[in-house]
Image: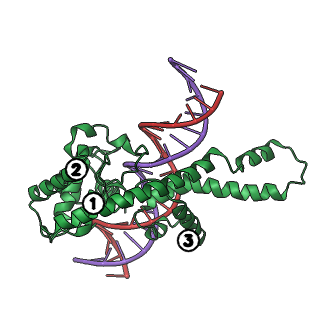
Chain colours: A green, B purple, C red
Amino acid sequence: MVRAPCCDKMGLKKGPWTPEEDQILISYIIKYGHANWRALPKQAGLLRCGKSCRLRWINYLRPDIKRGNFSREEEETIINLHQMLGNRWSAIAARLPGRTDNEIKNVWHTHLKKRLKNSHGSNKSASKTTSSTTSKASINNQSESEPSSSEFSSLTDTSVATVETKDHVQDMMNMIKSEAMEFSESFPEIDESLWWETLSAENSGNPFEFSDAGNELQHQSSFTSSDSVEFYSSSSIDDHMDFWYDLFISNGGSPELPEF
DNA sequence: AAATTAAGCAACCGCCGGGCT
DNA sequence: TAGCCCGGCGGTTGCTTAATT
């Protein structure tokens, strides 16, 4: 039996998501949830396959996504968990709240794997310091194992920056949360976390994205026309409140909470 | 300043397993 | 039990940006 592809590619869009598509997806999920990913794009009016919608939601739009650099603690956690679990990214992600398997996978391949390799190589080269071998390979190995390599230092630096910005973000989020909770009392059927996570993205280009104060936001490539979209141009708590309130009401204000 | 290379990351692909009929 | 559907997972690709030559 030849199984049909996961989705009919005919007429379905691929590639980076636009803000408009994001908005449609978010609106739909807020209203109806995502009980059936396969049927979702058709019902929502998106020219995407269900898998693409699911991936976009899970990895990027979900309100409880934690954006920004990984802290040193998170990196250590990933390394430790990877030693125990191997490439079971979803299992690792389950132990890192707010992080996605895809994100962890990327971090592993771009940073942590090299770091481990370097530290391993460093140990090896240290144990071979008596060796008089000066082959190209050993030279490369030594330079790679240099602890102040840009790759390593960038990890250290960014983790420091992340700690600093985390405090800022935490303060901001506490403040926003209190406002969100106050506001949500008017809409008790709405889960607190929806408002709180939504609003926590204040100052961010993406309402779900945590602002990494002082750092240029990553992942902007798919938001090329954000300026023209109200959703992405809101810059204050009130704007976000208004936007989500309007969105909620315009969507019929379903008493059924979507599952995030 | 332009060209080339490397790094980072969002998104896609194909497979697998659970649940339903 | 077999067949099918669907969600989830891990590997991989390809685009964008940054760094280097």
Q: Chain of mark 3?
A: A
Res. A55 in view: yes
Q: Which residue is mark 2?
A: A23
Q: Earlier in the sequence, mark 3 or mark 1?
A: 3
Q: Which residue is mark 1?
A: A176
Number of marks present in the image shown: 3
Mark number, residue A85: 3
| Left/right of residue A142 with respect to residue A30 in the rendered view | right
Give the amino acid type for the residue marked by disc 3 in the picture: Leu
Secondary-structure class at tag 3: helix
Place residue B14 in its image quadrant: bottom left
Give the amino acid type for the residue marked by disc 1 in the picture: Ile
| Left/right of residue A102 with respect to residue A208 in the rendered view | right
Vertically, is A129 above or below B15? above
How crowded pointer 1 is (Cα within 10 Å; few <14, some 14-19, many 20+) is rated as many
Place residue A97 in its image quadrant: bottom left
The quarter of the rendered structure image containing the N terminus of chain A is bottom left
Q: Residue at x 51, y 63 (%)?
A: A74
Disc nearest the viewer among 1 and 2:
1
| Left/right of residue A70 with respect to residue A230 in the rendered view | right
